[in-house]
Amino acid sequence: MTHHRDTTRIRHNTKIIATLGPASNNVALLRDMIMAGGVNVVRFNFSHGTAEFHEENAKIVRRAAEEAEREVAIMADLQGPKIRVGKIADGAVALKEGASLILDAAFTGEGTGERIGLDYRELPNDVRAGDVLLLDDGLLTLTINEVRGSEILTTVKNSHVLKSNKGINKQGGGLSAGALTEKDFRDLKTAIKIGCDYVAVSFVKDAADMELARKKIDAECTDGVKPGLVAKIERVEAIENLDEIIRASDGIMVARGDLAVEVGNAAVPALQKRMIQRARELRRFSITATQMMESMIENPVPTRAEVSDVANAVLDGTDAVMCSAETAIGNYPFETVIQMAKICAAVEKEQDSLVGAGDSHIQETGRIDHAIAGAVAHIARHTRAKAVVALTEQGNTAFQISRYELLIPVYALTPSHLVQWRMAMYRGVRPLRLAVSCNHDTALAEVEALLKSRGLLESGDQYIITSGQKMCHSGSTDTLQVVQAA
């Protein structure tokens, strides 16, 4: 069956992350999602699939991006510890309110309505009588009556059909499982091998988790551009250690699913705003994820509540909004991305012109590139500049400029395709690949010629350009100019 899709580009500054899965891992569909909806990052869920599976998907993404003539980053999302129940006979069991249920870390058989095994064998050591366990994203509540060796004796608080391998959370947090498992270390090697631009670490508790992940990446990547690290904030402990985690990461993901189970649904919206703001203040990026367009797994249009959810994340200043099952296994992956792009574009159009919500609180560091980024934002808001242009070897200056939520485009030109892909995550940044002359004046002329040839600038347009007097040197940005295109 041939699909005829409108691939007219919907321009937006907030980046869109689409999870790849059976519904979307073909070149033609993904190309159209990139062209029209502006998919900027593709997420690989390492909870599923083999190394060979992910390697093949990486080829699909790179080919689709090449056909779409767009820059697209790949983010590997590590599984993290399996805090889950074990296998259940016939795949599921109906549990009735008031029934007794034993969770048994030593039980290896198929679970029943009386006894179910655990993938997470340390659970009996992490809980005590009176604690509350939330299973299957909080749809099943168990209260603990007694812990007896490997057995956790509980009472079922609400009727629910529990399926095999569903997740377990402890209300209020406190599970001791580390963020990185042996499987994660193997998957990290795969992610690096296939060229992933970002690695997301699940169930982070503190900065030490991120420092360990970075140490592993440094050991695997001895040269070149290393993947950026994303901390998934989904534990109570992560909220308590938020600032140190942000500082140890390149960005954070507001992973609202498990977080909501641990802290309660009502607490999540305010925490989301706090996390996004704090990431921006500390000069890191943020991703907002989980159930943003959930109804579009089955339906071709989102609910009004989902539209508002995406819109509020954009207004909060998130760098990226993410689709999970909607694009991985849903019936409408293309339509989901289009709807998300339209929401981003509409909200950004209505934002106060060139005014960022948290700019005045962005941390000052004394670094030259940070100071230049702040000056760019100030000049952009007091001139008729049509664009910001950043010549960058590693993408750092472009990223720092993106912290200021400018509504005019930031064109980041780099000679490296690896840097180009990585910059695809940054809000408002449109990466372009161009190897410029090492002569400063010649390089600026080459940049303007490229932008005009692509219709991104016209004669007479005013734009701001950042560069280094010492061209072709990483970290040399020290110059800001306001230019009128010839």
Image (cartoon, rainbow, N blue to C red):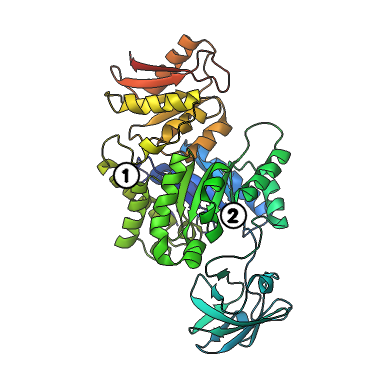
Q: Which residue occupies the foreground of this view, 291 or 229?
A: 229
Residue under the point 53% across and 13% down: 437
Query: Where 232 sits versus 34, above or below?
Result: below
Vertical relation: 481 (above or below) 370: above
Quadrant location, the N terminus: bottom left
**Does residue 463 appear to the left or right of 164 in the view shown?**
left
Distance CA(mark 2)–CA(mark 1): 32 Å
Nearest-to-viewer mark from 2 and 1: 2
User: x and y percent of residue 101 in the render?
Assistant: 60, 85
Depth check: give the residue in front, 180 or 197: 180
- 49 is higher (above) or lower (below) than 159: above
Residue 204 image label: 2
Q: Residue 451 at what x, y percent from top left?
A: 39, 23
Marks 2 and 1 close (CB-CB < 8 Å): no
The residue that appears at 72% across and 81% down in the rendered structure is 109
List the residue tagged with mark 1. 345
